Image (cartoon, helix red, strand yellow):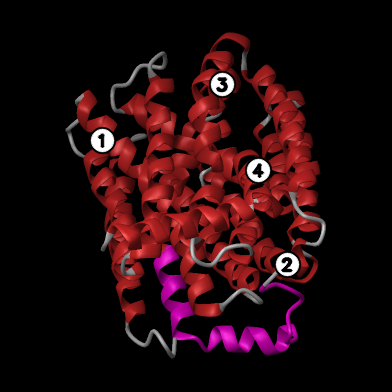
Amino acid sequence: MTERDWESIVSGYAAELRQNWRPLLAAMIGMGSGMSFVGTITSTIVPTLLADTHWAHSDFAKVGALAFFMAFAFPFIGRLTDVIGVRWTALIGQVTLPLVYLAYSRMDGQLSTYIAIFIVQSVLCVTTTSTVYTRLAVQFSNTARGLALAIVASGPAISGFVIAPLLNNYVESAGWRSAYTAAAIGTALAGLACFLLIPADAHRAKQAGTPKRRARDDYPMIFKSRAFWILLGAMALCNLPQTLLLVQLKNLLLQNGISGKNAGFYMSLPLFGMLAGRFVTGYALDRLKPYVVSFVSLALPSLALFVFASPLDSPAIIILASFFLGFAFGAEGDIVAFLVARRFGVDIYSSVMGLLTAVMSFSTASGALLLGKTMESSGGSFNLYLTICGFAVLTGATLLLLLARGEKTG
């Protein structure tokens, strides 16, 4: 590549990103304050919550299985986004999520109360996920689509990198109720900023618009696509261990010899890895073979999972494994969005994403249930769960290589 070619690429990227800074910034803020950030908040607060309420770790792990409710909502949310646009779809969750955090802060300490609030959160707040917000990146980018998706998807990592250590210290000193109250205030302010930044006519932006076909025409076409079923299988397998990052990371670190005082630092490592995964993968998807990039990026957590399951627990090893977990989690957001846009286009982008995200949610919920069962059978150890998930993730990443076959007809 000549210097002139490189300058042309950089200038093209910069021009597209500069022209569309507003929707991309809105989506990044939305991702960084919505459901994609809930896992960081929950993982940070949960150990203190469990210590205060005396809920069994295995019982709480099973609560994650209630995300099955979330899975049923995603296809409807995806279709709604294609029809009325991101701005009004996201508003549902932007209003509800702060109220959910307030409800957590005021609950009576019964697990049943937590479950009731969690169900409301799982159903109504999914409008603040990548199924909705990444549509802005797909609509407003072409040349730099991978990088635009990375910018949008980096929201949770940036928020977590800054907020996780602060929230960890705050919950240790002020308690879980005050921590949830602070989360409610911050989420409300971020949601307002996101809503105001999204262009009012974003759903009519270039390459967008209401779907040209009816749902009964679109979905049969989607289900007949070989690419859809490959993506579905890959995402189902690769998301089994996501409950670790969403709610169990601090507990996993504590079991590997990390003290509660130092957990804040180690919890920032996956977030840093997530941020790196977003941008490295986003740029690579634009410039290299996307299916090979997808395989390499999503296979990384299998190494981390096997390391966590092994006797290796030196600080250097834990740091590297934590980074790999975050890197793959960050990369996945870019990968699934990029491949869906590549194979299905923009008009039905969120409809396809809604279906795939539903499967990913089912997988995450199944992983939470699997974790609860394996912890019960192994005396509270993560190791069996980590080993099972390590093989599942490696298989799922390998499936993505099949997408290279039939690229023009998938």
Please report the residue visible at 62 percent of the width from the left and 88 percent of the height from the top.
220
Structural distance between the alpha carbons of marks 1 and 2:
42 Å
* Kind of residue indicated by mark 2: Ala
Task: Say whether residue 235 is magenta.
Answer: yes
The stretch in magenta equals: 207-236
What distance separates the C-alpha of mark 3 from that of mark 2?
A: 38 Å
Q: Is residue 329 visible?
A: no
The amino acid beneath tag 4 is Gly
Q: Earlier in the sequence, mark 1 or mark 2?
A: 2
Q: Name the quadrant containing residue 358.
A: bottom right
Give the answer, above or below, for where 73 lies relative to 90. below
CB under 8 Å between callouts 2 and 4? no
Label of residue 205 in the image: 2
Crowding at dot 2, Cα within 10 Å, few <14 / some 14-19 / many 20+, comes out as some
Which of the labelled discs sits on residue 320, or is there none? 1
Residue 372 on the magenta span: no
- Alpha-carbon neighbours of circle 4 within 10 Å: few (<14), some, or many (≥20)? many
Q: Which residue is mark 4?
A: 34
Residue contact between numbered discs 4 and 3, judged by CB atoms under 8 Å: no
39 sits to left or right of 240: right
Where is mark 3, residue-wise? 167
Q: What amino acid type should be assigned to the residue bearing mark 3?
A: Leu
Q: Tell me which numbered mark, 2 or 4, is placed earlier along the sequence.
A: 4
At x 31%, y 69%, the residue is 289
305 in relation to 215, above or below: above
